[in-house]
Amino acid sequence: MIHLKKIYWFLKALIANILYGFPSREITLIGVTGTDGKTSTTSMIYHILASLNEKASYITTVHAHVAGTSYPLGFHVTTPSPFFIQKMIRQAVKKGDRFFVLETTSHALDQLRVWGCRYKIAALTNITNEHLDWHKNYTNYARAKMKLVNQAEIGVVNVEPSTYYKYKDYIHNKNMWSTGVEKTADIMYQELVDNGLKDRFVVFEQENATVAYGVCKLLGFDSKKIAHALNSFERVKGRFDLFEKGGVRFMVDFAHTPAAFKQLFSAIKKSVKPLRIIHVFGCAGLRDKSKRLPMGQLSAQNADLSIVTEEDYRTEKIETIFSQIEKGFRKVKDSVKDKTYYFVEDRQEAVNKAVGFARNGDVVVLTGKAHEQSLARGKKEFPWDEYKAVDIALSLKLKA
């Protein structure tokens, strides 16, 4: 079945490239891959280029801006179909753009959806366990990611994650540059600060910023101008998005892997310093099941109250997902069902419950959905907006 899917996507990519005349050969194509941080890093690179008055386009999970036109995304897709990709690159070429930044997933690479794309430079943010439902094991997943770095003219790889040493031997690109925040690398975060960056990013954002800086520096842009451009970068919607409404503080973030949970909770404790953390999260159905236990364990270890809810359960029984997450809670000594953690199937009701618990000084952390505009229940997509859910919960609290 997997091989048939690869053939299917390869044929679509081949036809799309022929139809649009292999457009990536006429523009500087920049690819960004990684388990976490792809969208933010892609957006940073585009922001730098735009700030330097370069004509550029980009596609991310959240948004696409191509040839002067914006395309809001927000459903369960990161790298679109080959026809959409090649059409967008052709439009950018026609408009006279010099650069195109494309967020690129392991699925797209392994399934050959981006076949025919000629990458000038490729960036890797990190690799942690994810998508093992498709790739079957970590090695296959890492090798799929490495396809992007290895086929590009120039590779930029973040060495900060501890898992870097598990996959570094798969990197065969001789023109590979490393980036780091604390670990020694070719391009360091301190270089950004020395060139004028205001040190306003939390740790995982520093990693993303250093990768983006490295990409633009290797493209030949002035280091000081790159650093100053990043000073005006605004966080992507749903990425470490902290705000206050109705006397309650909220954090909306797309974190949906154990590694992302670790980074997020650490950053919240250091920069937000809440009285209590109230965490609302779930785990996708028909996807990598191995991450459910550690996500439950990390929530139990870091949140004072956890509310487990739906997060695109698809055709899988939500009770099965809950039971696998609960195994993580049971590993933490002080976790008690219906006291420190709860199960609420309906996501709106889960948000309502979290807001009901919230007191002054607390922060309600909503993870996993962020920018997405739908919830997958069964075989259907239902409208969803995490921010509207917050508004509804607050209005109910005021009426109570």
Image: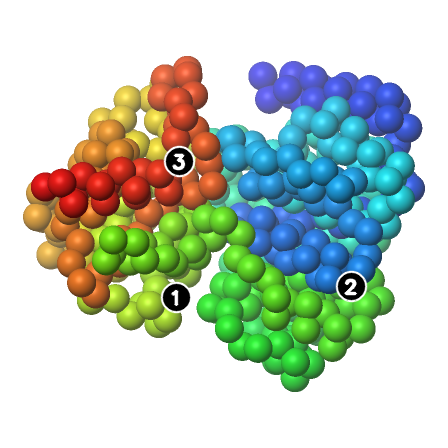
> In the rendered structure, which amino acid carries the disc numbered 3?
Asp
Q: Residue at x 68, y 57 (%)?
A: 47
Q: How many marks?
A: 3
Q: 390 and 112: which one is in front? A: 390
Q: Quadrant of the C terminus?
A: top left
Question: Disc 3 or disc 1, which is closer to the eye?
Answer: 3
Residue 384 x/y as whole percent: 39, 31
User: What x and y, as percent, mark residue 237?
Assistant: 49, 49
The residue identified by callout 1 is: 267
Q: Earlier in the sequence, mark 3 or mark 1?
A: 1
- Real-space CA distance between mark 3 and mark 1, rounded to the nearest whole angstrom: 24 Å
Which residue has dot 2 on it?
52
Q: Which residue is mark 3?
A: 385
Residue 2 image point, x, y percent: 60, 22
Identify the element where label 1 is drawn: helix
Marks 2 and 1: which is nearer the front? 2
